[in-house]
Amino acid sequence: MSCNDGHNHGSGFSCCHQKEFVQDKLCCDFRLTTPGPTTIYTADPTAVGCAGLFASGTIKNCGTIDITVTFLRGVGSDGIGGTVIRTVVVPAGGCATFTVSGFDAITVTAPGATPAVPAVGELCILPRYRIG
């Protein structure tokens, strides 16, 4: 029996159930001229629901100062608050990969960022939403 046929067949493995997802891809540059935190990604929790958002991707730090990337759930419309789901420090010139679920915003904090020495980078994210 194959798990790819969409049936459990009494195996007890939930991975054998067919699941339907929608996947998007977004890549964008960011430039911080203040220490932050600055929101670089926001999902619409009313359309997706925090529990239904799964995302993988990369964060590239093209600058000369370390950045801290924070995945949050429940950030207010003013960009403040929320529960920290995961935090990743990306060193200057470095890159990090991630797979995270249950968040609706990503912020970047760059201690020491100024207009003369900005924190610059790129976020590439593949959010997946469960449908049905």
Image: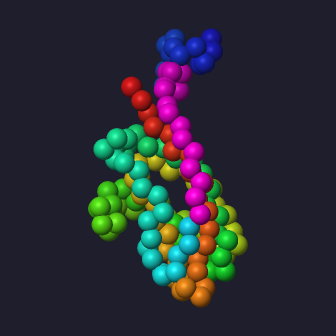
In the rendering, at what x and y percent does residue 32 appear?
Answer: 53, 76
Q: Nearer the viewer, residue 63 or 91?
A: 63
* Quarter of the picture holding the C terminus: top left
Position of residue 94 relative to residue 131, above or below, is: below
As drawn, the residue found furthest toward the right would be 93
Residue at x 45% of width, y 71% of height: 38
- Picture quadrant where residue 94 is located: bottom right
Image vertical order of residue 63 relative to residue 49, above or below: below
Residue 127 drawn above or below residue 122: above
Image quadrant where one finds the N terminus: top right
Q: Quadrant of residue 131?
A: top left
Is 34 left, or right, of 28 in this rendering? Answer: left
Please name the residue shown 49% across and 31% down the image.
21
Count all numbered tags in the image, as a single digit.
Answer: 0
Please state which of residues 7 and 19 is positioned toward the viewer in this rendering. Answer: 19
* Residue 74 left/right relative to 28: left
Nearer the observer, 86 or 80: 80
Is residue 6 shown left or right of residue 38?
right
Reply yes or no: does residue 27 show up in magenta: yes
The magenta-colored residue range is 15-29
Residue 70 visible in rendering: no
In the displayed structure, would residue 36 be above or below residue 9? below
Residue 9 within the segment the image draws in magenta: no
Residue at coordinates 41% horizontally, 50% vertically from top-left?
43
Between residues 40 and 68, which one lies in front from this camera angle? 40
Q: Position of residue 89 (x, y in %)?
A: 57, 70
From the top left corner, tell me how far across and down residue 48 is, in percent.
Answer: 37, 41
Image coordinates for residue 125, horizontal then vertical, percent = 56, 51
